[in-house]
């Protein structure tokens, strides 16, 4: 029989550690608790009708929810994906066995945002189709849908504005937006190179929504040329040189024409 009392005690300690921001202790307790719930017979896909089935399912779901949030917070996107895959059956297959989770909208929104940040647009739409209607109306899913729309339209200014912490639905999104902001600014830098022949550092700061040091770092990484007025784009024009004349090629063509002319005559 599953040791529900010990598992519940460990889950309480895990919840407390996660809320306090103790990532080391959270990771350790997650490992302990996952080993414990692996022996629960009531979990999907078996769903054995034990006397403690409700407790087993609740403890397992809560554990995987914290696991997803912990991985997102620590920036481990691969582990977040694995834990969400383990959590998903509790959201989809246990609707009649468990009360609704207060964290489901948040975790669903985070998962959709992760797919967008990883540029997995097709998978984003597939996943969105599986989201229950009541979760679709949550601010977290709406935020992910709005982000996808901005990415498709190239509305980079809107994305950068959304990345500010006071505009995020929850602090957990910050780690995804740190990565997304770098990608978006790189895209803006590419657009600047195509759209302008030159630009001042101040204008670049405004377009990229970043500091002067960030613009300077981008300019150095992309090898932008600079003069006293700002950054210059396009190939640097060189003065005409005798080396620009393809002398050998012209000579060969002239000799070939002479030979052909001799044959005709």
Image (cartoon, rainbow, N blue to C red):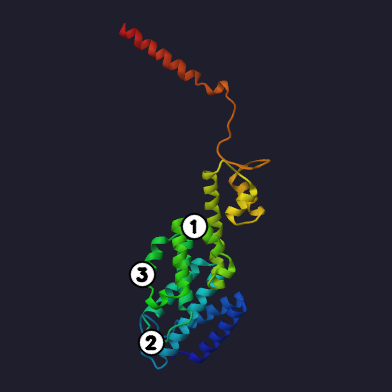
Q: Residue at x 39, y 10 (%)?
A: 258
The reply to whether residue 82 is in sight is: no
At which x and y percent is residue 261? 35, 9
Q: Residue at x 51, y 82 (%)?
A: 33
Of 71 and 52, nearer the camera is 71
Q: CA distance from mark 2 to mark 1?
A: 43 Å
Query: Which numbered tag is attached to residue 155?
Result: 1
At which x and y percent is residue 96? 36, 86
Q: Residues within 10 Å of mark 1 (few under 14, many from 20)?
A: few
Q: CA distance from mark 3 to mark 2?
A: 23 Å
In which quadrant is the C terminus drawn? top left
Q: Quadrant of residue 224?
A: top right
Horizontal side, residue 26 vs residue 62: left or right: right
Q: Residues within 10 Å of mark 2 (few under 14, many from 20)?
A: few
Mark toward the start of the polypeptide (1 vs 3)? 3
Mark toward the start of the polypeptide (3 vs 2)? 2
Q: CA distance from mark 1 to mark 3?
A: 24 Å
Residue at which label 2 appears: 97
Residue at which label 3 appears: 129
At which x and y percent is residue 247? 50, 18
Describe the element under mark 1 as helix, strand or loop.
loop
């Amino acid at each position: 029989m599953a040791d529900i009392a010990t598992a519940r005690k460990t889950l309480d300690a895990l919840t407390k550690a996660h809320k306090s921001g103790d990532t080391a202790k959270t990771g350790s307790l997650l490992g302990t608790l996952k080993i414990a719930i692996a022996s629960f017979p009531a979990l999907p896909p078996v769903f054995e009708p034990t006397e403690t089935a409700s407790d087993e399912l609740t403890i397992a779901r809560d554990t995987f929810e914290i696991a997803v949030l912990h991985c997102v917070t620590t920036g481990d996107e691969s582990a977040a994906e694995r834990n969400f895959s383990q959590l998903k059956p509790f959201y989809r297959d246990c609707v009649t066995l468990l009360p609704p989770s207060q964290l489901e909208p948040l975790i669903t929104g985070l998962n959709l945002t992760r797919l967008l940040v990883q540029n997995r647009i097709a998978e984003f739409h597939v996943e969105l189709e599986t989201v229950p209607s009541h979760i679709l109306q949550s601010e977290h899913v709406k935020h992910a849908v709005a982000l996808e729309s901005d990415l498709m339209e190239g509305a980079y200014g809107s994305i950068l504005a959304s990345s500010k912490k006071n505009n995020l639905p929850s602090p957990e999104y910050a780690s995804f937006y740190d990565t997304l902001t770098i990608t978006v600014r790189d895209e803006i830098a590419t657009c600047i190179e195509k759209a302008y022949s030159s630009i001042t550092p101040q204008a670049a700061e405004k377009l990229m929504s970043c500091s002067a040091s960030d613009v300077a770092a981008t300019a150095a990484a992309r090898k932008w040329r600079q003069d006293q007025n700002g950054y210059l784009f396009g190939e640097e024009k060189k003065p005409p040189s005798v080396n620009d004349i393809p002398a050998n090629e012209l000579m060969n063509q002239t000799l070939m024409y002479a030979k052909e002319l001799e044959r005709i005559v």
